[in-house]
């Protein structure tokens, strides 16, 4: 994953709940929700624009800094436009694919949900913002779609992720509509009534492609989600002008949404469901899309789906992470148990450093922080797969 730098992680501001409630009440008058010290601005007059106001973020009281990726120290990066030394630094952390099926079904209630992701949640909570892919329909009804695998979870899964340190999830993937129209309706209802913002899905295209915005210490961040996996979900359940579904990476709407977000935010992040299962190198479709998103103004493009870690680095000034692997997963060694948390540090609109906290999925399906020989093995894998990613080890 390019040069291995150590990111200085910051604990999120701890604000007394009474003060948060007061701030949230005042902010809501102005149309802004305050979530654990982060101002969240919605792009649409929906529950997602204000959910979480005055609610505790469910962060652990203390987050233990994860191990560095390598034994080397910080590597300086060249100065470049868009990253002035005076700009504040913020961090955004990413995990891979998550669901609550099979052996991980009980994680929804583990530690009242706060322990759903296990100790790796400390690495997510330590960043200013964090994100995963929730690869599941949120329903207990519906009819299974004609496909091999079906994943579902209760609405409490959204609360469990939030309690585990996740700030926003993408649900643009090939399992969000595993239970047809009823399952999709239930999923949208759950999203609308819970406190975890979700991107990449919506009641229509305007909602599915809409970014989620957050203001972090004066830096406005836009987060979008989309799927590039050609399957039943994309062919039958892509969101339309007046129909619900997921955001498609093949639609011009995605690039248009990124261009608009570029005008509205300092940092633009796109989380994709992309790649080919079991393939270590990015596909031509991934490479093409990464270039298109970079040209449209994305500052970071990350994703998952291949069930293993893929290479990462810089495409000009844009950071690209082709594959985050499985994270909380139902099946043992589904191609690979190697995983981890990618943390990017932004200054202005640019990624100035990256760090990867290695983890390995244990027999319970939980990503456990790795150390010693296991951690080095995962780092070695990342170095190997990065050679075919066609990315630079520093920003251009």
Image (cartoon, rainbow, N blue to C red):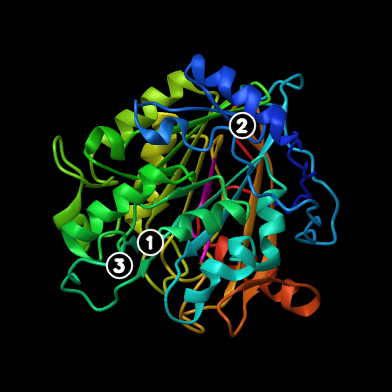
Badge 3 marks a residue whose secondary structure is: loop
- Residue 50 in sight: yes
> Would residue 27 be found to the left or right of residue 371 on screen?
left
Check the image and report above or below for 158 versus 9.
Answer: below
Compute the Cα span from label 3 to label 2.
42 Å
Check the image and report above or below for 153 versus 11.
Answer: below
Compute the Cα span from label 2 to label 1.
25 Å
Compute the Cα span from label 3 to label 1.
29 Å
- Residue 199 in sight: no
Q: Which residue is mark 1?
A: 275
Badge 2 marks a residue whose secondary structure is: strand
Looking at the image, is mark 3 or mark 2 earlier in the sequence? 3
Q: Position of residue 137 (x, y in %)?
A: 32, 62
Q: Which residue is mark 3?
A: 140
Q: Position of residue 45 (x, y in %)?
A: 34, 25
Badge 1 marks a residue whose secondary structure is: loop
Instruction: Give the magenta range.
Output: 319-325
User: Badges 3 and 1: C-beta atoms under 8 Å apart?
Assistant: no
> Would residue 206 be found to the left or right of residue 334 on screen?
left
């Amino acid at each position: 994953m390019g040069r291995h730098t150590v990111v200085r992680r910051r604990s999120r501001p701890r604000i007394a709940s009474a003060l948060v409630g007061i701030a949230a009440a005042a902010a809501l008058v102005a149309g802004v929700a305050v979530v654990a010290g982060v101002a969240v601005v919605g792009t649409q007059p929906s529950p997602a624009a204000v959910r979480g106001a005055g609610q505790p973020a469910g962060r652990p009281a203390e987050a233990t800094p994860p191990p560095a990726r390598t034994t080397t120290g910080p590597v300086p990066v060249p100065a470049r436009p868009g990253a002035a030394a005076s700009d504040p630094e913020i961090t955004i952390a990413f995990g891979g694919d998550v669901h609550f099926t099979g052996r991980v079904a009980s994680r929804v209630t583990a530690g009242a949900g706060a322990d759903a992701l296990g100790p790796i949640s400390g690495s997510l909570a330590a960043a200013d913002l964090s994100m995963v892919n929730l690869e599941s329909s949120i329903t207990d009804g519906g009819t299974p779609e004609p496909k091999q695998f079906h994943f579902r979870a209760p609405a409490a899964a959204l609360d469990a992720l939030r309690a585990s340190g996740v700030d926003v999830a993408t649900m643009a993937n090939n399992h969000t509509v595993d239970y047809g129209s009823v399952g999709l309706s239930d999923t949208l209802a759950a999203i609308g009534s819970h406190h975890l913002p979700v991107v990449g899905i919506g009641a229509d295209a305007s909602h599915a492609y809409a970014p989620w915005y957050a203001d972090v210490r004066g830096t406005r961040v836009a987060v979008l989600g989309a799927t590039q996996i050609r399957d039943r979900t994309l062919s039958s359940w892509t969101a339309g002008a007046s129909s619900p579904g997921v955001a498609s990476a093949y639609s011009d709407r995605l690039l248009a949404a990124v261009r608009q977000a570029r005008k509205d935010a300092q940092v633009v992040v796109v989380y994709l469901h992309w790649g080919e299962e079991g393939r270590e190198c990015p596909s031509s479709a991934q490479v093409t899309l990464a270039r298109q998103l970079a040209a449209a103004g994305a500052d970071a493009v990350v994703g998952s789906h291949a069930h293993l870690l893929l290479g990462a680095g810089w495409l000009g000034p844009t950071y690209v992470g082709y594959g985050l692997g499985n994270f909380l997963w139902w099946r043992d060694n589904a191609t690979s148990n190697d995983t981890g948390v990618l943390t990017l540090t932004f200054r202005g609109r640019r990624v100035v450093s990256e760090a990867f906290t290695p983890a390995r999925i244990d027999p319970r399906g939980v990503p456990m922080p790795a150390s010693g020989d296991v951690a080095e093995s995962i780092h070695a894998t990342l170095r190997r797969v990065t050679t075919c990613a066609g990315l630079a080890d520093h920003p251009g």
